[in-house]
Amino acid sequence: MDILASHSYPSRRSAVLADNIVATSQPLAAQAGLAMLARGGNAVDAAIATAITLTLVEPSGNGLGSDAFAIIWDGTELHGLNASGRSPAAWTPERFAGQEKMPFRGWESVIVPGAVSAWVALSERFGKLPFADLFAPAIGYATDGFIVTPVIAELWRRAAADLGEYPGFAETFLPDGKSPKAGERFKNAPLARTLELIADTKGRHSTAESWPTRSVFSLRSMALR
Amino acid sequence: MAAHKADWCGTISKKFDDLELHEIPPNGQGIAALMALGILSHTSIRALEADDPQAYHLQIEAMKLALVDAETYVADGDHMSEVTSEALLDDAYLATRAALIDPAHAQDFGAGAPKNGGTVYLSAADASGMMVSFIQSNYAGFGSGIAIPGTGIAMQNRGAGFSLDPASPNVVGPGKRPFHTIIPGFLMGADGPLMSFGVMGGPMQAQGHVQMVLRTQLWGQDPQMAVDAPRWRVIDGRRIACEDKMRADILEALTTMGHDISLESPDNAFGFGGAQLICKLGEKGYTAGSDPRKDGCAVGF
């Protein structure tokens, strides 16, 4: 069977109607959020669990190195959250002198990521469930694998052609040198370990024995210098 | 990540009759959706049907006017000293912008849309009345291309959102936030929240917000129908992209008005983004639509 990103026949959907709803671009991630609502969490818990799961199941669009923004209606008023990261301290205009535009890929395009700070801020202010619980679906899928969906598989295939030579890309995203096809299972055990670390420390792991901490700290020092 | 702290920044908003669209204040492009809606409130769009070519024309022209300002003035809010968000959203200013629209001819206002991006958007709502509009992105598909071995962490490339033009408030600098394409949307009505929504896809987002607000509110389309509807996208100058499922008579009328149209298949280009909408139903309950251009769905109980 071919599981395709584009179909030969039109498909239709009805609007979904319910008292509790999660909507997003990948079904497992939507249901990870719904599972939090089913066990007594609120819409913020659902949103965070969905966002965490998306870092695994839709790597073409986001990851742990993402930025994030949110608007929350808490039942009484609106709140806005800007969790976009800042540039490193060394990024003066002189650093990029002679270039026509900013580098689009590679380390010189990377700024401090803010997504994890969004999850922490949202959970601390509005969440009902323990922060660590929101990671369970994503850690499960990262450890045991999940079945890749067709539109994401197509974007993954395109990226493999463009990014295969970038540091760490193939090792992380191209098992056996190839992007997973729709219908194939993809595991990401290293991401499971990093998610566990973030779940346990709220992204504020302060000792330096593990790689994520070191790399995050080196970015941090770049940003703060 | 350990160093970074998220900011509770509030929202900026613009009214269109009883509707009030809320966006995150700059460094993001959300202000472009507010400006376009504000410009449209000074036009005849209320009298038009959803698929009247004139309704498309007015939206496209308003969007171009909003995008050219966003491109010129939006940066890290701390660096927007000469032209502020307030000035860009001023009603009198937007009325003067609306007056530039020629009802019969497409114009080149010098606008370009932001680049394509890889982003995820989600919306969640619960029975207690809490609603969340959330967006998260690596920017280009898979971001910078750099993944940290042994961690599963892929790094974004949002640094590419900076300008190298020294005259731009968005010029690269240390400890600064670049212009950002990703925007969560939220729509309020006279009696409270109406819709938690977003449209991922770099150039499509502010443009998508305007299309979703008008389809669901002005034209009463349910969230799935609004999401399914063929979309248009400003490219630059007089160039726009339309989905190939758009009605032929609409495309013809737009071409006659001088729009330079390229037809794109949504699944080939991923250029029309992915929308998720959750709308409130009266006192209790919601109805949601999820974009058929993506793999996802709306689920509930």
Image (spheres, coloured by chain):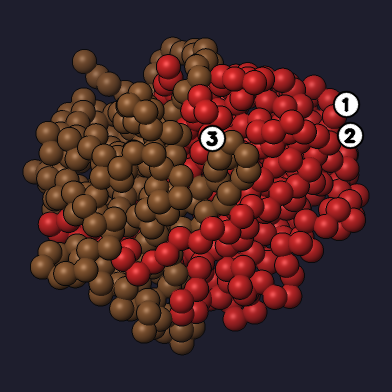
Chain colours: A brown, B red
- Residue at left 66%, top 72%? B80
**Residue under pointer 1:** B47
Give the Cα separation between the discs numbered 2 and 1: 6 Å
Mark 2 vs 3, N-terminal side: 2
Percent coordinates x, y for residue A10 in the rendering:
47, 13
Quadrant housing residue A181: top left
**Residue under pointer 3:** B131
Contact (Cβ within 8 Å) of mark 2 with mark 1: yes
Indicate the quadrant containing the C terminus of chain B: top left, top right, bottom left or bottom right.
top left
- Residue at left 38%, top 57%? A117
Contact (Cβ within 8 Å) of mark 2 with mark 3: no
Q: Residues within 10 Å of mark 2 (few under 14, many from 20)?
A: few
Does residue B8 appear anywhere in the picture? yes
Callout 3: SS = strand
Subunit ID for the residue under disc 1: B
- Residue at left 54%, top 43%? A72
Which one is nearer the viewer's eye here, B296 or A76? Answer: A76
A35 with respect to B114 (left or right): left
Callout 1: SS = helix
Callout 2: SS = loop
Q: Residues within 10 Å of mark 1 (few under 14, many from 20)?
A: few
- Residue at left 76%, top 27%? B218
A62 with respect to B278 (left or right): left
Residue type at mark 1: give it: Ala
Name the mark nearer the viewer: 2 or 3.
3
**Residue under pointer 2:** B44
Quadrant housing residue B47: top right
